Amino acid sequence: MAKKAFVALVLVLAASYGLHAQQVTYDRIVRAAEEPQNWLTYSGGYFSQRYSTLKQIDTTNVKNLEIKWILPNQVFGAWQASPLIVDGIMYLTMRPNDILAVDAKTGRVFWQYRYNNSPDQRVCCGSNNRGVAILGDTLYMATLDAHLVAVDAKNGKPLWNVEVGDPKVGYSMTLSPLVVKDKVIVGVGGGEYGIRGYLTAHDARTGKELWRTYTIPGPGEKGHDSWRGEDWTHGGGSIWVTGSYDPGLNLTYWGVGNPGPDWTPAQRPGDNLYTDSVIALDPDSGAIKWHYQFTPNDGYDYDSVQVAVLADIDFRGAPTKAMLWANRNGFFYVLDRTTGKFLSATPFVKVNWASGHDANGRPIQTPQPAGMPTYPGNQGGTNWFSPSYSPRTGLFYVSAWLDYASIYRRQDVQYQPGRTYAGAFPITRTPVPGAPAPGIGRARPINNWTDAVAHGAVLAIDPKTGQQKWRFDQFDVTESGNLSTAGDLLFTGGREGYFYALDARTGSLLWKSTVGGQIVNGPITYAIDGKQYVAMISGNSLIVYGLRE
Amino acid sequence: MYSAVWVARVTAAAVACLVVSLGVRAGAQQNPQEHPGQYSQADVEAGSRLYSAQCQLCHGLTGDQVAGIDLRRGQFRRANSDEDLARVIATGVPGTAMPPFALQPPEINSVIAFIRAGFDPAGTAVKVGNAARGRQLFEGKGTCTSCHRVNGRGPRVAPDLSDVGAARSPGSLQRSLLDPSSQMMPINRPVRIVTKDGKTIAGRRLNEDTFTVQVIDEQERLVSIDKSTIKSMTVETRSTMPAFAGKLTDEEISDVIAYLLTLRG
């Protein structure tokens, strides 16, 4: 009798210990692919493929999806967040810097944390926040006034708050942080305000800054000679999209933004490292191990603030630890992520600012005559929104802007703290003088610019060749992220209020839902009690779909 | 009645006027045929110098220092057309602080040019005529009311012009009259759709996306069409509005512009 009771007690204790051990550990994030029912980090896993092995929803039954629940946002404006799912709980951010804990099965809210933003904060392009990170029972959010805050995941109470930058001189943060081992890594925005950009790593328990690596090298630092005189002090180099990590190589990869001032390259001669580059850092020390620059001395605002997608592929017959990158500058790159070696670059949209690359991967720039259009235009062939890579199809999926150009006008500008330091805004090439430009995001139901100015598409690119396997055209441009699954589905949206499920192999349209609002960023998928769900944000609503029963 | 300060200011201004006008006169004679219906660049520049010397004292750097008047934005109290402005400048407004200015006609012309250019010394200044005559042309010889609607009267097929004076600059209005296609918003292009079951829908496009297109048709009906039902769709890049260069004189066009500028919704 006693023995039975003892065994029962041990079992009960073991079960409750098991519940405590459900905390998100670094190891769980490394192995995120083994728990596809969850979504533990911004891009789904450290390789940032935004791919799920869930296949309950597939090409045969996706037409049976129905809305399971909707969570409306009370704050208007582009909602760029990507949620996390941890064991049935969704963690989500809302403008400007709120965090919600939501029951992912029913959409009911457990708690809401509201951050008090500083009135000094300034942002170029919207009060955006792309989501939280989690480690243990702590959520991490980067704020518009450049603070990193830690909030308890169970009760929404703030734990600590550290300053990462000074908002009065244009530093802000909009990205979702990246947890690596026992550290939280964030980057700063403000590339239009004459900042000197950097990445910082913080102790996950206390918030203490452990290292800071500037994206613009200072005197004595490698790459400093790519700047003249004092230009580096306001060199830009923001980082506002979450990086990737290879635990085997112990390298973390981040895309760096435009130089400052944006559109006047003659005002800052030199390559302007590490703007418009990918940098690979040792996450323990912050040391830059290698870099590759996509656009030296950029005059087009071709920020390389894209997600670094890591994939192990066969490239030209050799197994390669690759990095796949559809850059804002209109080229699709394959790099060796061990060394940064340039492997290939292929245009994925019309490009005329460069004619190609030399053997080392340096672009051969072909600036257009004054008053003539440059392809791609200022917002790029693609931008910050999430691409996806499916190991099943071997295809890289990206939302692109086609037939889109800008006319750039060069105008010197002076630095003033807190004011924009960018130069003369480029004019989108439109067929009618004064016709509206497609701009950033879409807040109105009428498309005034039309496909005469630009149109969107999802491109499926074979990284081995750079060729497009298929293309799904849209009338308006698109800022949607992409999600691919083992059900051979590609989920995507656009600006027009349609949410699509495409066949990931062929691009054919299998299902669409008229949700009405602009979809700006990435859908995710998860499962609870053996049922798969897809979550996306359209306009001011987060909508979760599941199969009709 | 007038303060000593004011008298001193006007006297100083008059003296300055004499000095400046000697320089201004030389520059004011430019070829008016280069840009019909527009003031010359030289006029605009000359006007900006005269304005600083004579008018800025009271009207301010951006023309809005006198209550109810915003010269830069074309908001006046007692003037509408260029003729009206010339009269106000030359004769003043008795009983107010606006004195008469002894300026030569080309000098007055140049100040008006500067005002019509929106205070931009490098801007385009379009001639603005008589609004009453413009209305007659709009409703008569110009046949504008056969397509356009104003304040509840007229067809809805073409864009409604009830607030066009608040939305568009004189330069943009002139371009619409001389070369309508050059000012047509891409979304508003004429469309002609033939459906698979043989219906034809023609009209002005209002909106479009990947799967549907929205039109106001020739019978003023709002129609949303699913693209999967369409056999052919033609989107014209030329407007159906006729170009009025040659149909109306430069003076008549400037009168129509004056009338359109009064339409502020």
Image (spheres, helix red, strand yellow):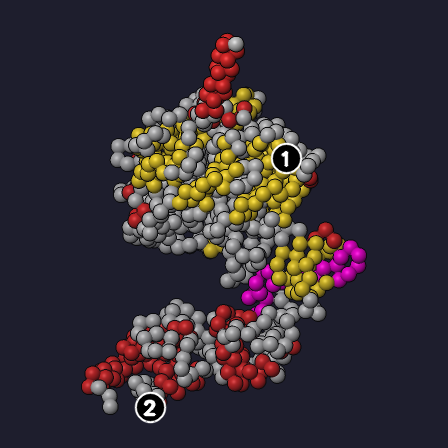
Instruction: Tell whether position A25 is magenta.
Output: no
Task: Bin the neighbour count of mark 2 within 10 Å (Cα to Cα): few under 14, some 14-19, many 20 and up.
Answer: few
Residue A218: quarter of image: top left
Q: Give the range drawn in magenta.
A: B179-200
Q: Provide residue B234's location: percent of width, then percent of height.
A: 69, 59
In the picture of the structure, the residue carrying the numbered disc 2 is B94
State the residue at coordinates (37%, 86%): B88
Query: Is residue A284 found left or right of B16 in the rendered image?
Result: right
State the residue at coordinates (56%, 39%): A106
Please state which of residues B191 and A427 is positioned toward the viewer in this rendering.
B191
Please state which of residues A368 and A378 is positioned toward the viewer in this rendering.
A378
Name the chain under label 2. Answer: B
- Name the disc covering residue A134, or none: none
Q: Helix, strand or loop at disc 2?
A: loop
Residue A482: quarter of image: top right
Identity of the residue furthest to the right in this view:
B197
User: Where B166 sits versus A498, above or below?
Assistant: below
